[in-house]
Amino acid sequence: MKANIKELLYELIENAIYEAVKSGELPEIPHPKIKIEYPKEAKFGDYSTPIALELAKLLKRSPMEIGEIIKNKLLSLNSNIIGNIEIAKPGFINIFISIGYLKDTIFQILREGYNFGRRTKENPMRYNIEFVSANPTGPLNVVSARAAAIGDTISNLIEAAGDIVDREFYVNDYGNQVNLLGQSVLARIRELKGEDFIFPEEGYHGEYIKDIAAWIIDNFSSQLNSLEDENARIEFAAQKAVEFNVATQQRDLAAFNVNFKRWFRESSLHLSGEVEKAFEKLEASGYIYTEDGKKIFKSTAFGDDKDRVVVREDGRPTYLMADIAYHYDKIQRGYDKIIDIWGPDHHGYIARLSGAVQALGYEKSKFQVLIAQQVNLIMDGEAVKMSKRLGKFSTMKELIDEIGVDVSRYFFIMRSLDSHLDFDLGLAKRNSSENPVFYLQYAHARICSIFREAQKRGINTEISDFDIAHLDNPEAITLMKLMSKYPEEILDAAMTYEPHKIATFLMRLAQGYHRFYTEHRILSDDAEKTKAALALCKAIVVVLKNGLNILGVSAPEVM
RNA sequence: GCGCCUGUAGCUCAGUGGAUAGAGCGUCGGACUUCGAAUCCGUGCGUCGCAGGUUCGACUCCUGCCAGGCGCGCCA
């Protein structure tokens, strides 16, 4: 496990305060809460702590004075990270990273390559992250695509932070909706065969139902015909349709670079008796009562608006009960953290499920639901209505076919989960500077072309050492400082489940490179200067590629 | 009525309780005989929805309003 700069500084400041206390310059301080932040302006340093401001009140001394004391102790600790320290106006302690440390960072990046920004832990946590989990009643839509991009990227981040993630998809292959699917498909089968048929009132009207019907006719006609009972035929059609849809979903997600470790079937819970077992466990916890023959879970004990029925009067479990059983299954698999990613329409469901998880004895904080807000598709400045009637781009597959995996994933990730994302299809389709994905990829391809050019000229691009003085310019320093922060950004994004932060970071890095490129010639007559510039470029390629990799976006060498 | 999310520049959005609130796009004007111009540089008169409160300090936290989205099933 490697500490990042922020963690190292945290430790240094802690030590400095300790030293000051030891020497009597500061009184005993119980538990100083040290905050380290990134100042907005370069003149305030690379890292800054308001610790002196906060201590001032407590110690009844001037913050400037306290700042000076901490500064002197920090300097006496002789860290190679700190280049300079300034105490500014009210009492901020502003720390400037030394240029020597930045050079070390470049070598660290070149040495670690793919592993730069990644951590390993002796005792990694085991995460289960469930996302997409769309009903197997049709192809995935654009909303699922956002969930897929977000869930996969969060998983990537957590893995980069050194923990273990199982990506999981819950298949609701049980109950009313599936039965309705079976009825719809069966009706279409009869329609295709020219027989009389009644299409179910609430059935699935999409064109894809006809494809499924045709597929069943082509492959399973004799099996279907051998069934006497209408319910058995519906069941058969439903099962085949589910297989068809799940296979389609799996294919579409794989094409989106999202691969689940497990596709968990709801039906398996019912078949194995796990639903009953979970109910018994819940009942044993004392949170179940009976009313009018129904079994009700006392979810209000956990902050829900009302108690929830888990077993109907006729003994059939509700959807919630199965979901509780599913989560009980996950709990028993021993995960340290269980995360569900849902759409905004399910937020009201959190309290009851979280309550059940707690009633089953799982720690509240270990189960977390992330809500990804809705997606509005914008075409020609107008919101595209998404309904079951299938607007032009409503399915995930059409989206990928139309604008590609890279652009789709990036657009879904670049905004925070909380933001109601406007997905501008026109902008996404444009291969121009307006499209932020190309801006990033262009930076990567542009550097790669420099290395191709260097090879052509016979310049050695394997750099064992260089003089950092050649990189002592604002553009290069900005780049080095940014890259040195990359491990912190990854960790921060992983811990807060905020993938958009990486998108923002990469934009800044690409921008930094484009500026550097404009201002400085990389392959010059000066061999030493060339070496230094190439080392910098090589590091940038690594960081860009690592970051894009986390987002699931490709880093093309030519475009 | 209750709950969750949102409200920041013309548009789309960043912004861990800190210093003069930022970026992309759009607009307008510049920069390629030399490593990729899918680039760069310049150009912004913002009541951070409104009103209170908390404190050394609030876009950020609390309360109440206003506006938009979504949800409030023994459906899944």
Image (cartoon, coloured by chain):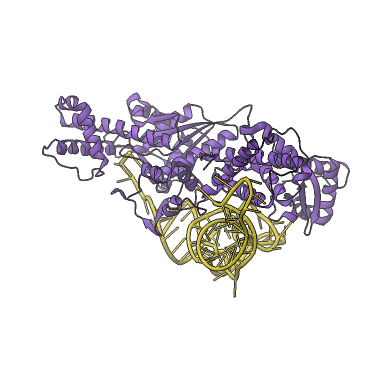
> A389 left or right of A58?
left
Residue A275 can be seen, yes or no? yes
Front-lying residue, A138 or A366: A138
Front-lying residue, A475 or B34: B34
Front-lying residue, A189 or A135: A189
Percent position (x, y) of residue A216? Answer: 22, 31
Q: Which chain is purple?
A: A
Image quadrant assignment for residue A209: top left
Q: Which chain is yellow?
A: B
> A491 left or right of A249?
right
Whether A222 is drawn above or below A469: the answer is above
Percent position (x, y) of residue A384? Answer: 36, 55
Residue A172 can be seen, yes or no? no
Front-lying residue, A195 or A400: A400
Image quadrant assignment for residue B48: bottom right
Tell me the residue at 80%/45% (across/down): A83
Percent position (x, y) of residue A491? Answer: 62, 39
Tell me the residue at 30%/32% (across/down): A244
Tell me the residue at 36%/28% (across/down): A269
